[in-house]
């Protein structure tokens, strides 16, 4: 009796890692850290997708990208088809593939992640967008016939760009008003070049302009024109102005020269290219001993920027432990690789300075972790008598940002909450003021790029319904 011949077991494909700059090289330049997938790596990673009939990954995407569908197209080598499929739901794939917290959203729900590493959805989205930008034809998705309706979008951050991209495809005329001299909002002033190159953001904005979106720069709504004046010219207005008002520690010594908000520190370096001074006439203190206060992605961006500006020591001073850091795991990992030094369970008490007004140090108090607080993280509790000092010449406060009141206080009829954020329906983005919608950080407070885009998607659907059927 002949023995039964068993088919060889299919070899499991490991998650494909993106090649990237070595830490000792990248910590001294502003070039993007990962190099991205090659077509071969992308197709190999795409083979890992199980093509689930009920894809949980899609449930984790705030803008509902058809994830298995675009991954299948990459696997088949149809890279143009892949980007077309993504564009159906997401106008900013090159951005999302780089900065979205996929580990907590789409990849966090991937079935493969239960026993193995999840499919690298973000890396594949980035690949499709980058391949199209670098090698693809000048293609555009189809647009609905013109409706004659006009929409004003205030702010060109992720939520505003999403609204504009959605509504232009539905046939409406869209104009974006941006206060800064370049489009992109927090994508250009808040996220460093080494994590999100400005060329990528400008390319995504150019894509919207090719679709027909108008972008007016250096236009501060509430100064050059009020929201009510916009309403006289447009059928609907969307407010996506973000939350860019710096929050400080409110401890003695914050007036010393060398103390920055993360907003100012990153804006000078990112958008105004202070790292290339004097080629770009934007000065910034190039500290040798820099301390960053906070533990989120903005703190990691600031600490890694300090190294690239020539810091010998870049400290993260954080009042909880490593386990409570809110930053993405990838950002923490990159910071550690590059030499950022972490001072956990340390709370700043006061800044120290010299007679000329320059920052010289910070005094901190050691902490220990107690019971969980409202955030679910263990509350830091002071250890009496544990004060210590750290010599620094630059401090960057990265503990969050608030709502800038310029627009909100000059717009009658907008309801605000106790923190100054706009009150809007979480499912539609409708505000209390007729024909005005809002979304993103100006409604929720500082959050992620993809959540702001999700809010933009909900608002654009609601705006389209209004323009089509009435309020």
Image (spheres, helix red, strand yellow):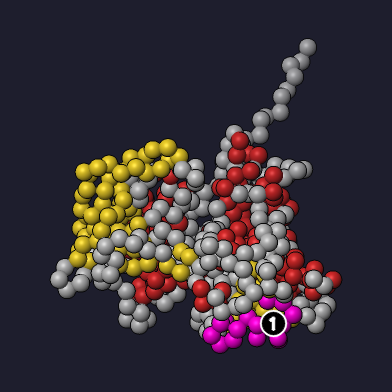
Which stretch is magenta? 221-237
Q: Quadrant of residue 7?
A: top right
In the rendered structure, the answer to whether residue 397 lies left or right of residue 237 reads left
Q: Does 187 sit left or right of 114 as displayed?
A: left
Q: Residue at x 58, y 67 (%)?
A: 416
* Front in this rendered view, residue 367 or 283: 367
In this view of the protein, which residue sits in the foreground, 226 or 117?
Answer: 226
Residue 122 vs residue 414, the one in the foreground: 414
- Residue 147, quarter of the rendered image: bottom right
Q: Is residue 238 above or below residue 103?
A: below
Which residue sits at x=32%, y=74%?
Answer: 284
> x, y (%) of residue 51?
73, 44
Which part of the image, by quadrant, shows the C terminus? Answer: bottom right
Q: Is residue 406 above or below residue 462?
A: below
Mark 1 crowd level (few <14, some 14–19, many ≥20, 10 Å Cα): some
Given residues 164 and 131, the one toward you in this image is 164
Identify the residue at horizontal 67%, vertical 68% (top origin): 431
> Which quadrant would residue 126 be assigned to in this image?
bottom right
At horizontal 70% and vertical 55% (from top left) the residue drawn is 64
Is residue 211 shown to the viewer in this render? no
Residue 446 makes an appearance in the image = yes
Provide the residue designation for mark 1. Answer: 231
Q: Position of residue 209 (x, y in %)?
A: 65, 79
In the rendered image, the quadrant that contains the N terminus is top right
């Amino acid at each position: 009796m002949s023995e039964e011949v068993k088919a060889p077991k299919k070899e499991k494909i490991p998650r494909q890692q993106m090649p990237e700059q070595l830490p000792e090289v990248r910590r001294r330049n502003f070039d993007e850290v990962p190099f991205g997938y090659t077509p071969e790596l992308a197709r190999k990673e795409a083979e890992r997708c199980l093509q689930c009939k009920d894809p949980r990954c899609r449930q984790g995407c705030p803008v509902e990208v058809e994830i298995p569908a675009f991954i299948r197209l990459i696997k088949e080598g149809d890279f143009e088809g892949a980007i077309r499929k993504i564009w159906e739901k997401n106008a900013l794939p090159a951005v999302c593939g780089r900065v979205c917290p996929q580990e907590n959203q789409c990849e966090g729900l991937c079935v493969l992640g239960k026993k193995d590493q999840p499919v690298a959805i973000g890396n594949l989205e980035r690949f499709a967008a980058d391949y199209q930008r670098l090698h693809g034809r000048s293609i555009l998705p189809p647009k609905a016939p013109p409706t004659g309706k006009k929409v004003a979008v205030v702010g060109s951050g992720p939520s505003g760009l999403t609204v504009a991209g959605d509504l232009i495809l539905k046939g409406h005329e869209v104009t974006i008003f941006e206060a800064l001299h370049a489009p992109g909002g927090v994508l250009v002033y808040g996220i460093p070049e080494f994590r999100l190159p400005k060329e990528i953001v400008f390319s995504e904005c150019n894509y919207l302009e090719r679709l027909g979106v108008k972008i007016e720069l250096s236009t501060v709504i509430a100064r050059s024109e009020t929201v009510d004046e916009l309403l006289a010219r447009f059928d609907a207005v969307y407010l996506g102005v973000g939350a860019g008002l710096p929050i400080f520690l409110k401890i003695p010594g914050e007036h010393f020269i060398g103390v920055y908000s993360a907003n100012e520190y990153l804006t000078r370096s990112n958008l105004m290219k202070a790292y290339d001074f004097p080629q770009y006439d934007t000065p910034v203190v190039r500290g040798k001993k820099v301390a960053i206060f906070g533990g989120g992605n903005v703190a990691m961006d600031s600490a890694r920027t300090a190294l690239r500006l020539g810091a010998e020591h870049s400290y993260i001073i954080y009042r909880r432990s490593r386990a409570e850091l809110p930053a993405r795991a990838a950002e923490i990992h990159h910071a550690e690789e590059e030499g950022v030094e972490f001072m956990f369970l340390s709370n700043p008490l006061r800044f120290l300075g010299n007679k000329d007004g320059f920052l010289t140090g910070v005094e901190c108090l050691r902490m220990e972790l107690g019971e969980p607080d409202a955030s679910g993280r263990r509350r830091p509790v002071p250890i009496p008598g544990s004060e210590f000092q750290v010599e620094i010449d630059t401090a960057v406060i990265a503990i969050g940002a608030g709502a800038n009141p310029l627009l909100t206080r000059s717009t009658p009829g907008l309801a605000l909450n106790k923190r100054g954020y706009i009150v809007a329906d979480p499912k539609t983005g409708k505000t209390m003021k007729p024909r005005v919608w809002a979304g993103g950080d100006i409604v929720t407070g500082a959050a992620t790029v993809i959540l702001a885009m999700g809010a933009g998607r909900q608002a654009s659907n609601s705006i389209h319904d209004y323009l089509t059927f009435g309020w």
